[in-house]
Amino acid sequence: MTLFEKCRTYTTAREVMASGYYPYFQPIEASYDTEVLIRGERKLMFGSNNYLGLTHHPRVLAAAASALERYGSGCTGSRFLNGTLDLHEELEGRLARFLGKEEALVFSTGFQTNLGVIAGLTDRDDHIFSDQLNHASIVDGCRLSQARVHRYPHGDLDALRLELESVPSDAGKLIVTDGVFSMDGTVADLPGILEVAESLGAEVMVDDAHSLGVLGKKGAGTAEHFGLVERTPLVMATFSKSLASIGGVVAGPEEVIHYLKHHARSLIFSASMPPASVATVLAALEVMEEEPQRREQLWRNTRRLQEGLRGLGYDIGGSETPIVPVLMGSMEQMLWVWKEVFTAGVFTNPVTPPAVPENSCRLRLSLMATHTDEQVDFALQVFEDVGRRLAALRPPESGA
Ligand SMILES: Cc1ncc(COP(=O)(O)O)c(C=O)c1O
């Protein structure tokens, strides 16, 4: 089969489109923080990673506008050559201090950060140990690396230990884990991982995409949450969630950051973060530090939604963060519920394999600090109504 023939004969998505249940690529016409406009209809946004609700904060918008004015719309080159602004360096200094690390390095996306760091740091004789539920960008970073990759069962530290013990003791070893698992909303056992790593001479890298701004007293992520900042060697995070922008960062020892600056191909061979995006992150960091009440509200909203959904009989797995999955099982049932919920005015994220295991489809809801009680209660009411209709239909499996 030729490549284009393969594309012509790929019908799965078209079949779902024809059935009227295709949920992806919904075009947002306008955004008002917790609400968006789609095809002229307002929807309550419960599918955004905008945890602290900073994408519309006046100081964040003003900082972006002034950077646009001063530096123009883009850097038109890589950090390595013509694409480094004083703003990038200011942001790196601020993030290193915030994350409690010697230095930090900023990439154009979180995805590129994982690709560049994992593949840049490891070589042919090294070994990477990656949790089976890690994000796709970690999986792809492992694929790009020349190192031998060991995927250990989710959260299974005995299996991790056995894998580590099976490789030469003097080999380079990197354990990579999501801090918060993005499809389940659970927190990694960082204390346990560090204990295994330290006893067997491995380095640890934590992906704090969903932890930055969310976990820890000041929002510095998983390591801060567990009081393990000093012992956690490498942290990466994205700016596309709590920090209301786009981009990514890795923070760690000076010599590691220096090495990555000269070996991370997704940094060296890709254009740098645009000025307005960098300024957005700087301003968002300031607001985050000055307004800790946003994080407190985020957690209040999280508890309200989690308790409400559990009370309605929905299975939200082990969610312990603002990511709240509503487990549905089959794709058909999940798409049916997604459409009912969407039509009733609530935007959620439908998740199917390969992002999650087979028959583990779910709607993923994410809380924002700026959701009001009324908005959370509206979403709960919609889930209650839809759950009742679902039960009446008596489908083959039931999440409610
Ligand atoms: C755990 C995790 N790591 C990395 C990324 C990639 O970040 P970005 O979307 O900023 O490229 C994501 C994004 O969804 C994520 O959830």
Image (cartoon, rainbow, N blue to C red):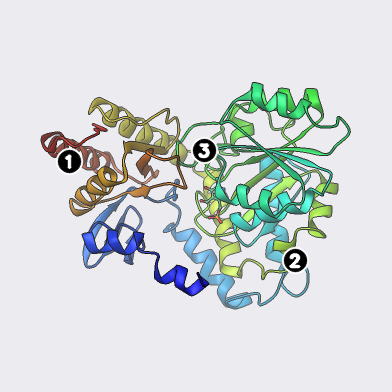
Beta carbon at label 3 within 8 Å of ligand 1: yes
Counting from the top left corner in percent of width and height, residue 380 is at 23, 37
Gap in angstroms between the C-alphas marked 3 and 2 = 29 Å
* 127 on left or right of 225: right
Residue 86's place in the image compared with 244, above or below, is below
* 391 on left or right of 58: left
Gap in angstroms between the C-alphas marked 1 and 3 = 27 Å
Q: For numbered disc 1, what is the local secondary structure?
A: helix
**Disc 1: which residue:** 386
The quadrant in which the C terminus is found is top left
**Disc 3: which residue:** 181
Q: Amino acid at mark 2?
A: Ile
Crowdedness near tag 2: few (<14), some (14–19) or many (≥20) residues, C-alpha within 10 Å: many
Q: Amino acid at mark 1?
A: Val
**Disc 2: which residue:** 268
Gap in angstroms between the C-alphas marked 1 and 2 = 49 Å
Q: Residue furthest left?
A: 392
Counting from the top left corner in percent of width and height, residue 302 is at 37, 35
